[in-house]
Image: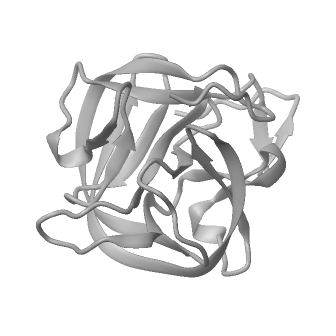
């Protein structure tokens, strides 16, 4: 589990899944990077400014897809993705050339996005006991950071534990932290 504290993030913490909800069809975003990602690398995604879960690279063989060492299936387009310097961006706004923070056990590096791919897919919302939530595609290639190892989304159930990345308390306006009242659900 990552130990390094990144700007704006609190200490990484395990958190139990308290709710999984099937949402139906929506647009999911895949980010294709210009560099290979290892199996332990991923990006931070989340529905609100409370914090994030780590969506892992597609650098693992599954039944339906070959390895895509350059790709992260980042989930629904309305979500935040953690970028360089503690800022966040909506996945809908990510463009080729953007730098995204990629997290691993050994630290954080910035990697440039080469392509953004959006498609209509079945989506699920997962909610953690600490209030952090994310919306991800129902696919066997989607893995999230678990307490001990990456966990396939299609096998997750309420009570399972994921690694979460809480943010320092703040609101967000245009991706930047602001000191004002903002409530997101």
Q: What is the count of numbered marks?
A: 0
Q: In this view, does 89 lie to the left or right of 144?
A: right
Name the residue at 40% across, 67% down.
28
Viewer-proximal residue among 66 and 95: 66
Colour scheme of this structure image?
one colour
Name the residue at 75% across, 34% down.
6
Check the image and report above or below for 94 versus 165. Answer: below
Q: Position of residue 47 (x, y in %)?
A: 52, 43
Residue 113: quarter of image: bottom right
Viewer-proximal residue among 92 and 139: 139
> Given the current orientation, which residue lies at the most extreme right position?
179
Q: Position of residue 55 (x, y in %)?
A: 44, 49
Viewer-proximal residue among 172 and 166: 166
Q: Where is residue 181 in the image (x, y as percent from the top left)?
A: 78, 26
Does residue 55 show up?
Answer: yes
> Given the current orientation, which residue lies at the most extreme left position?
63
Q: Where is residue 122 in the image (x, y as percent from the top left)?
A: 24, 62
Viewer-proximal residue among 170 and 165: 165
Check the image and report above or below for 143 versus 168. Answer: below
Check the image and report above or below for 168 versus 110. Answer: above
Q: In this view, does 152 lie to the left or right of 42?
A: left
Does residue 174 show up?
Answer: no
Name the residue at 36% across, 32% down.
146
Q: In this view, does 167 lie to the left or right of 26?
A: right
Residue 18: quarter of image: top left
Name the residue at 11% across, 66% down.
63
């Amino acid at each position: 589990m990552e130990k390094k504290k990144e700007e704006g993030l609190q200490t990484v913490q395990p958190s139990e899944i308290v709710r999984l909800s099937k949402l139906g069809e929506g647009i999911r975003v895949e980010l294709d990077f210009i560099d290979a990602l290892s199996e332990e690398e991923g990006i931070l995604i989340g529905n609100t400014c409370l914090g994030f879960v780590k969506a892992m690279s597609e650098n693992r063989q599954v039944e339906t897809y070959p390895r895509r060492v350059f790709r992260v299936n980042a989930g629904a387009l309305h979500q935040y993705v953690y970028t360089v310097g503690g800022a966040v961006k909506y996945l809908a706004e990510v463009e080729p050339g953007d730098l995204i923070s990629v997290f691993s056990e050994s630290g954080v590096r910035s990697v440039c996005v080469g392509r953004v791919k959006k498609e209509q897919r079945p989506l699920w919302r997962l909610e953690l006991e600490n209030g952090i939530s994310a919306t991800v595609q129902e696919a066997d290639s989607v893995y999230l950071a678990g307490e001990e190892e990456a966990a396939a989304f299609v096998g997750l159930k309420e009570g399972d534990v994921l690694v979460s990345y809480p943010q320092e308390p703040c609101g967000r306006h245009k991706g930047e932290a602001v000191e004002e009242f903002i409530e997101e659900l």
